[in-house]
Amino acid sequence: MSNDVLALLILGFPAAGALLLAGRGWRMPRLVTQIVGPGVVWAAFIVTLVLFFGGANGDFTYWTWIKSGSFSLPVNLLVDNLSLFMCLVITGVGGLIVTYSVGYMAHEDGPSYSRFFTYMDVFIFSMLLLVLAGNFVFLIIGWAMVGLSSYFLIGFWYHRRSAVLAARKAFVMNVIGDVGMILAAFVLFWQFHDLTYARVFSSVGKSDSGILELAAFLLLVGAVAKSAQIPLHTWLPDAMEGPTPVSALIHAATMVTAGVYLVARMHPIYDVATYAHDTVAIIGAVTALFAATIAIVQTDIKRVLAYSTMSQIGYMFLAVGIGAYSAGLFHLLSHAFFKALLFMAAGNVIHAMNDEQDMRKYGGLWGQMRPTSITFLIGCLSLVGVIPFVGFFSKEQILGLAFSRPGNLGLAVWAIGFVTALITGFYTGRMWWLSFWGKPSPDRPVAHPHEAPPVMLVPVAILAVLAVAGGFIQTRALGIGPSLVSGYLDRVTGGTGWEDTGVAVVLGLVTMLLAAGLFAGALRMRPWSARFPWAQRILEHKYYFDEAYDAAFVRPMDLAAGRGYRDVEELVIGGSLDRTGARTSWFAGYASLLQTGYFRNYALVFVAGAVIVAVLLVARFAT
Amino acid sequence: MAIAVFFVAAAMAIVGGVGVITFRQPMSSVLSLVVVMIALSILFLLLSAQFVFVVQIIVYAGAVMVLFLFVITLLGPARETGRGRLRFQAGLSALFVLVLFGLIYAMLQGITFRQPEKADLNVFGTVQSIAVGLFTTYLYPFELTSILLLVAAIGAVYLSRREP
Amino acid sequence: MLDIGGSQLDTSWFLLLGAILFALGTAGVLVRRNPLIILISIELMLNAVNLTLIAFSRQLENLEGQLFALMTMTVAAAEAVVGLAILVDIFRVRDLEDVDDLSEYKG
């Protein structure tokens, strides 16, 4: 089968799965949903593998959608190393997570169960569309659909008010990003009169860099919203209201990484728009540090992981922001492995503890849920960046490249990243020791938690293996060994242009040791919160971002809407309608007086009318 | 001589017309109308409409008015009592009627006719010429009118039958 | 000017007479309350129109006016017949002196 058909199949399988489950899923036996839901994702994965190993590369146009004057918009898919890489992550890790959720969501009733998998398949489809799109319009379509799927999935348990509010918050912030994307598309259209990647990227060199800066900043708005970076980050912690597989898939492995993909894909623009490019790195670094500090005080295990995600994506932004695209994408891959692993293992724990998510009520799980604990530990060590786990290779590569980069920006973001890595060690350690070590907490809801069923353990185990072994495909952090990832991706994004210094390698190892030390030492570091209560408060309120946004945006909008309703809707619009009716009624009251019922009155009116018309006619035509 | 005839007939017509609308008794009104019709038929004759003159007397004054008389005798002498319920009717009617008349009067000033078609005045209005017109050029209206009469007759019969 | 029987008559006199009769008839329809008299007034109006038609016919020496007058007469007869039949019908049910008593289409 030819590559363009295969590319279409990657999209086709999840779409077909979603349609089937949406239309018929709740009427079919549960087994069908359990097979179709993950099955279509795995089918897409296999197709992706075929294309990957076949070295597929091409811009496939299927149909011309818009033809208006000199502008034409094709329906095309761009299959190159970058998009295939993303597809592998989405379908591979996605497949594992969807399979996992077969077990996790088993408590749902029939229609709800298939509704979940419908939404998951819709999401997978949208994400694949986003990365495979060959022009800006379909990018934005996929972008918006991903946001929509996120809304559906966060608010999946829609009877819960908190879930609905969280879904709405996520959607609103995503829409802000969508607007940025659309404006960017406008700017690019205005400049290049075309919206396909091929033509836009090839014409970048011949255009005004100011316009490109504008476009790059607008695209950045979209990326920041989707990837939950400052300042559009407040939705991500709330998004943990969704089921754990949702958090794993959307808010760790795929959707939030769309921003990183975007910057990488748009690298021709960002290579020229240096201000925007630097901003990407700065936002990433600041967010990484910021999120890591908040993670220190979280008590909900999923919230720790959420802020950790925000922080790690900050690293990815940092990487692509300084021009180390393949390094950022490698961290995307490695983060997908260990963060999904962490979320799903946490899901096992939550499942076993009757949906309790407060870590202070855990304790001592190492003895009682050994397999889950082991996988969780692997995830933690990977997150901290300890050899030989994949997290070390990807994170330290980023830091090393930042350090070696000529110029001040690299050094600045390296410093922030370094401190963040240490804090990462600390909060990860805290999470680990609180939940899995020591004596079981007296507030434990379940005294003897049972281990997860195989359908939930196996995907976690697979990811654990990947987290262990994955690093060895790209060991550039050590300065030696294979660089399969950058070799693959640099063909699309271009290489970094500078070499690692030996100092960077050494610094990487030092960072690892310090972070690991904090991880271990977190066991004994409790009293600090008592010594700095003000710091504790700021962190617990997440630097008061939510309060600030509420005061600055939400409250005024509410007032304006209330005002608008009272003054405009009721008074003007409602009033005008009411009064029109009343006036017509009043008039009709008088008009009905004409209906006297007397024949002679009518005859009089008859004659009067004829006379008047005659007078008018004579006046008009008489000479 | 013709002028004298005209004025006499005109006076008759106007007196009769006033009588039509002013008599209290319907019988007197009908008889006034008969006077008007005879006056008008004289005027028709003056205007070279011999056939119409005869038809007016036979059909209109002779048949239609007789019909009216029959109905009046059937229904009995009714008198209009009191002033009636519509207060402004008389005033407004007078107004509009006067306006109407004034309008027509004004229009008649400076009226100019187009060139008359050259017809032979000896045969103008004779039975033959009317017949020729009715049965050739205006056959269609003639037939329709006869159907109209048929329908009216049926209608009248239907409307006045006794309820079983 | 018409040449009738040796003298000159002005057509507009006939038309004026027709106008007077028409106005009288209209006044009768509007003012009188006895339904019979109203019908009679309508007949008066129709006669006035006939006069006008014949006058024009003579002036323009076109026979159409007379033919039209004949048609009008026929239609007037038919209308009088049906109108009277309806009146008789109403009279069977109630004693009608005043047309205003028939005002059931009020409002």
Image: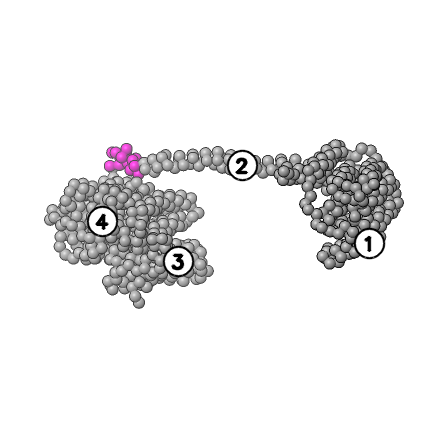
Q: Is residue A531 magenta?
A: yes
Mark number, residue A205: 4
Q: Left of B107 or right of it: where is A447?
A: left
Give the amino acid at mark 4.
Gly
Q: Are marks 1 and 3 on the same chain?
A: no
Give the amino acid at mark 2.
Ser
- Dividing the picture into quadrants, the one containing residue A2 is bottom left
Question: A508 and B110: which one is in front?
Answer: B110
Mark number, residue A576: 2
Give the amino acid at mark 1.
Val
The residues bearing labels 2 and 3 have C-alpha atoms spaced at a distance of 47 Å
The residues bearing labels 1 and 3 have C-alpha atoms spaced at a distance of 79 Å
The residue where tag 3 is placed is A18
Q: Nearer the viewer, mark 2 or mark 3?
A: 2
Q: Residues within 10 Å of mark 1 (few under 14, many from 20)?
A: some
What residue appears at the point 32 percent right and 59 percent down from the top-left corner? A61
The residues bearing labels 2 and 4 have C-alpha atoms spaced at a distance of 57 Å
Mark number, residue B157: 1
Q: Are marks 4 and 1 on the same chain?
A: no
Q: Which residue is outermost to the front?
A: C6
